[in-house]
């Protein structure tokens, strides 16, 4: 069901059900993914049916179905484009950058930084990569500079080459 509905939404259409409500809510709440909005509207409906029918077991199955559908819907609509955003502060930034460029074949950006304690200039390496590449990047940093400072965080919306087009319409 979620896969079919995801395909319908990707085509810019609706099925004429609660998804019309979700499309209107998406216009107002652009920061929420469409699957989350489906989840919220469906949970309201399921909660109301508990009051009407009073069958708790059936409601639990309905909640499980709503959760699975919203996750699958977002996977179809947005894909699995989650990635890691990594910042590396190291005295061996050139060596680390060279290996990341060569071995991982991903782009790297230098940010200019300055150590507050030492007052010395620092090159901060910033790069975004697929989740599967991040262990290799961490290994490169450990091998080149065991004293490096590294921040790894999740990135869920990445626009640019190799990721989403910034000019594409948000669904």
Image: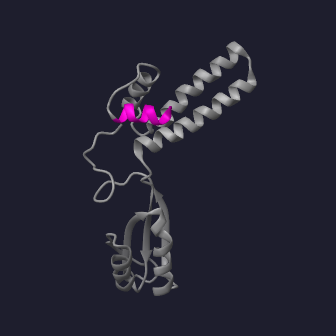
Front in this rendered view, residue 91 or 61: 61
Front in this rendered view, residue 127 or 56: 56
Tell me how the rendering is colored.
Answer: one colour
What residue range appears in magenta?
Answer: 1-10
Residue 4 vertical position relative to residue 111 in the rendered view, above or below:
above
Can the viewer see residue 145? no
At a point 42% along the width and 35% down the height, the residue shown is 6
Residue 153 image point, x, y percent: 49, 62
Q: Characterize the magenta stretch by its predominant secondary structure.
A: helix
Residue 141 image point, x, y percent: 47, 80
Q: Is residue 152 left or right of residue 47?
A: left
Quarter holding the C terminus is top left
Residue 16 sits inside the magenta stretch: no
Can the viewer see residue 6? yes
Rendered image quadrant of residue 78: top left
Q: Residue furthest left?
A: 167
At a point 31% along the width and 69% down the height, the residue shown is 107
Q: Is residue 81 left or right of residue 66?
A: left
Residue 152 image point, x, y percent: 49, 66
Front in this rendered view, residue 91 or 4: 4
Q: Residue furthest top?
A: 52
Residue 12 image point, x, y percent: 32, 31
Rendered image quadrant of residue 86: bottom left
Residue 96 vertical position relative to residue 67 in the rendered view, above or below:
below
Rendered image quadrant of residue 104: bottom left
At a point 41% along the width and 19% down the height, the residue shown is 16
How many marks the image carries: the answer is 0
Front in this rendered view, residue 49 or 75: 75
């Amino acid at each position: 069901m979620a896969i079919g509905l995801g395909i319908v939404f990707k085509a810019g259409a609706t099925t004429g059900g609660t998804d019309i409500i979700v499309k209107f809510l998406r216009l107002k709440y652009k920061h929420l993914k469409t699957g989350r909005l489906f989840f919220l509207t469906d949970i309201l409906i399921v909660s109301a049916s508990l009051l009407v029918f009073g069958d708790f077991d059936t409601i639990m199955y309905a909640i499980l179905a709503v959760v699975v559908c919203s996750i699958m819907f977002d996977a179809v609509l947005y894909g699995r484009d989650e990635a890691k955003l990594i910042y590396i502060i190291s005295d061996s930034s050139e060596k680390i950058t060279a290996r990341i460029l060569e071995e991982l074949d991903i782009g790297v950006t230098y940010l200019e930084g300055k150590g507050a304690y030492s007052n010395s200039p620092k090159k901060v390496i910033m790069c975004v990569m697929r989740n599967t590449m991040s262990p290799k990047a961490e290994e490169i940093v450990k091998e080149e500079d065991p004293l490096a400072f590294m921040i790894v965080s999740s990135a869920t919306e990445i626009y640019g080459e190799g990721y989403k087009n910034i000019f594409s319409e948000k669904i």
